[in-house]
Image (tube, helix red, strand yellow):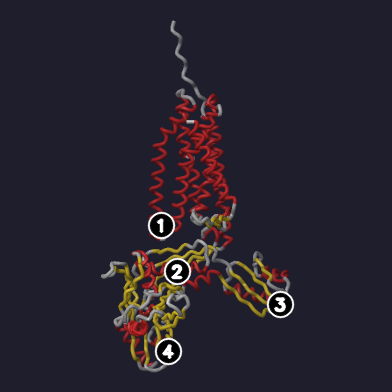
Amino acid sequence: MRGRTTRITVLIVLIMALAVASLAFRGIHIDVPVLPKVDREGTGPLGLKLGLDLRGGGNLVYQADTGTRLVVTFTDAHEAKAVTEALAGAGLTGADVQPQGSSNLFRIKTVLLDSAKRQEVRDALTEKVGTLESVAPTDITNPTPDQMEGALSIISRRVNLFGTEEPIIQRFGDDRIIVQLPGATGSQTEVEFSQAATEAAVRSALASVSLEGARIEVRSDRSYRIRTTTLDQAKRDGLRQALQDQVAPVSSYKVTSAIDNAKSLIGQTARLEFKERTCTDLSCIQFTDTDLGLTGDDLDNAYTATSSTTGEWVVNIQFNSRGAEIFSDLTRRIVNVNTKRIAVFLDDQELIAPVARGWIRDGRSEITGGFTRESARTLAVQLESGRLPVPLKLVQESEVDSLLGAASLRSSLIAGLVGLGLVMAFMVVYYRAAGVVASIALAFYTILLLAIFKLVPVTLTLPGIAGFILSIGMAVDANVLIFERMKEELRIGRTLSSSMEVAFSRAWPAIRDGNVTIFISCGILLWFGSRLGGELVTGFALTLFIGTVISVFTAVTVSRNLLQLLARAGLSRHASLFTPEGIRRPAAAPAGR
């Protein structure tokens, strides 16, 4: 028994040392060849990752933009302005008209049109613009799950390129995507004066427009970079005027907003392009790509299948009539040419560059390349999403200011410390020495839990911290059950060591069953949160789940081991220190006469 207690004590000390070490350094960067790479560093206290509501940032909601897309070809060249005016005359004032290379080809995005409205649009274009050569309409209806998954993948890649830490990107319902960008808040102003200006004068001008907390970076005696909270157009104009009037004439003035940059990047339509690649050698290390005018708009379908000859996973693609014609000409020219490839790009990122093994005349082709089922499906989703079946529009935008996030974090930390202190005080006052043991175990629990939050890592939000604070109170539940049972055993005359063992063994079923119900509740919350876009529910459930697991470990291992150490240290003779009530031993039987 003593050897087991010693081994567990060493294990607890080792775990505690590792947890303290992980929290002592703000950043943890470990890159050992035989071990997984560890790179953990957050913006919060102790290097913890903070979510949108604590760090500040932007919250964007995108919705699938359904409607009708028209590819219109005129016999003669025309300007886009004339096409827009003709559509407005037909009642389509919000239509988006984009020229496509040649001056007689236009792509039009508008609301969903029925057959009668399409004919009205055709008549208006013919009457007010010119003779039509062709009109190819495409209706974009409600998206499929795979199409939304493709859009989700594109946004995730763009947000990662934007450099936002710990973004939350997930589907919401059938046709919406939520994008949360922690840190995407605030504005950066680049200003250059026509003559030398002092930092004090710049700061005074900022104060005059209520921007006293701005950070100023002096780049030269004329050039400054100013970081502020997010500025709307009125504030931007007011700041420029204040600098102009109070400092010096402004020769250059540019304001960029992090959330605006993110919106610009995310809001772009997915660009799927097929290019002809010419290699300088057979290995194709050096090459040049030539634009073919073949894009995702020319792709009708992309799906996975197994090859009828080899049985391996492949990706089948099908072009429309225009795409089939371009693809046919391309494959005719490069078939069996070892220095030619067909390069496929999504958002300027290369997806694949296969060779042409035959002349494809009908626009149907099969892409091979040693795919697994999952990799083939991923490529098909990327190709499908690139043909723009799910254009997105921004339907909701909100911003959490970093100052609000800092106040929320400060309040949360105070609440956590107060809650921890009150629980510890109660345990010590009521359970005496046993309460001290519970308090030590609770401190161990808190340090270990924060270390796990950092190492996993868990992005902390306000609901997540609420789950953490709730788990602190629940962490002593097991101790209360054990101590109450131990009190009963001491009352009937058992020794301290015996009372501890009996209390732990008999309290364990209640501890186990109580925590299993919490695990089930957390699992349900995680399941619903991940499918319904309830990231607030998910954060609460995750921190509560992890906290409950650690609380069970500290109660049945740390607390038990500490009590055994105290018993071995000679406190067995002072059992009354471990119960809030005095121990009344059973009266001895009277001696026989």
CA distance for labels 3 and 1: 54 Å
Label 1 Cα neighbours within 10 Å, binned few <14 / some 14-19 / many ≥20 = some
Mark 2 sits on what residue?
155
Amino acid type at circle 1 is Gly
Q: Residue furthest front?
A: 282
| Residue 428, x across and y down, in percent | 55, 35
Q: Residue furthest left?
A: 308
Quadrant where the C terminus sits is top left
* Mark 2 or 4, nearer chain start: 4
**How many marks can you see?**
4
Looking at the rendered structure, the secondary structure element under dot 3 is loop
Decide: few, some or many residues near mark 3? Use Cα within 10 Å; few <14, some 14-19, many ≥20: some
Which residue carries the number 1 mark?
Answer: 529
Q: Nearer the viewer, mark 3 or mark 2?
A: 2
Question: Height in image: 418 above or below 140?
Answer: above
Relative depth, front residue between 253 and 354: 354
Front disc: 4 or 1: 4
Q: At which x and y percent is residue 40? A: 54, 56
Locate residue 125: give its quadrant. Answer: bottom left
Q: Which residue is mark 3?
A: 248
Secondary structure at numbered mark 2: helix
Q: Secondary structure at mark 4?
A: strand
